[in-house]
Amino acid sequence: MRKTNKLEQRPANSGFAKKRVKWSLNILPRINFCAMLKVLSSEIRFFAKPQNVACYPTDVQLGGFCKTKHFMRTAIILTLTTFLFLSCKESYTDYALTWSTDIKSKILEDINIPVDSTSINTSNPNLEEITLYSKGIRTKLYGISKTSGDTLLSIFYSKDQNFEIVRELCPGIERSFEGITYKGKHLGLVELRFCDGKLKEQGYRLNGNVGVWTEWDENGKVIKETDNGHTEKLDELRTIKYYR
């Protein structure tokens, strides 16, 4: 084992440094529609209260109010409330995106601590693996090409060592990769990018690929969408917690 400090100044060359936010056009109408329904529901609840107005001869009166009008208003409220709940319920993939973003954020926060020791593993014929520690706990690992000196792999560890952010980096491969592992298994959001940082492929994993995986060409045009189904599996992410 020998000490090294130069890794902390090593520039990232993964394409993830300038991360571009991908907006899904499909979610915008849903968000606006939910907000509109909430406003309408609030207004209708007010007008659903019995009003002291004159009734038509065909209306059945109860306590001085028009029973039929009050019934119709109540029916509208119940219908809109049900529709609001069904329309605005968070999808499995929406939750998986939130979960993945939260896990990554917590790991990156927790590894931002002083490094007090390092170890170097040279057994890999292609990479020199340098692991950084803080108080005996792994925080980061870098895989350095033995031929070019480029950083081709980086792994960031959670405090409990259960979670990892795994990145395979250009130029060692024709695309970069970023994903989360939990106890050695890939799950949550997976992103592959061209070496210029543009998104190449995106989808979700939990015991294999689930839901829709989308592929783009180098110009940002969608070229393929593969629906693997079983998005309900992503609900299992709710039981996988990040403990500090």
Image (cartoon, helix red, strand yellow):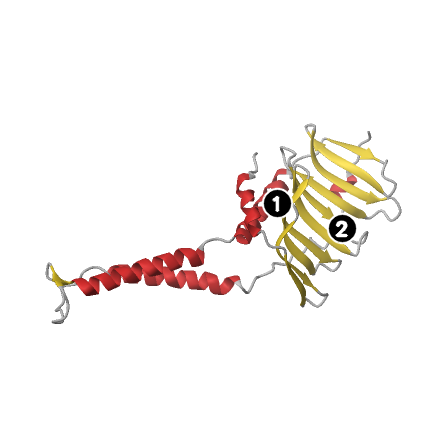
Relative height, residue 99 to residue 28 (above, below): above
| Residue located beneath label 1 in the image | 104
Q: Which mark is residue 178?
A: none
The answer to whether residue 47 shows anywhere in this view is no
Query: In the displayed image of the protein, which residue is found farthest to the bottom?
Result: 57
> Judging from the image, what secondary structure is the residue with disc 1 in?
helix
| Residue located beneath label 2 in the image | 169
The answer to whether mark 2 and mark 1 are in CB contact below 8 A is no
- Relative side of 85 to 70, left or right: right
* Residue 217 placement (x, y as % from top left): 71, 65
Identify the mark nearer the N-term, 2 or 1: 1
Residue type highlighted by circle 1: Lys
Quadrant containing the N terminus is top right
- Identified at 53% across, 64% down, the residue is 26
> Considering depth in this image, is 233 or 97 the residue closer to the camera?
233
- Relative side of 88 to 13, left or right: left
Picture quadrant of residue 162: top right
- Relative side of 84 to 101, left or right: left
The answer to whether residue 224 shows anywhere in this view is yes
> Judging from the image, what secondary structure is the residue with disc 2 in?
loop
- Identified at 74% across, 50% down, the residue is 12
* Residue 7 placement (x, y as % from top left): 77, 41
Relative height, residue 76 to residue 133 (above, below): below
Residue type highlighted by circle 2: Leu
* Residue 231 placement (x, y as % from top left): 57, 52
Quadrant containing the C terminus is top right
- Identified at 55% across, 43% down, the residue is 236
Relative height, residue 159 to residue 21 (above, below): above
| Residue count near mark 1 (Cα–Cα under 10 Å), binned few <14, some 14–19, many ≥20 | some
Picture quadrant of residue 69: bottom left
> Considering depth in this image, is 124 or 120 the residue closer to the camera?
124
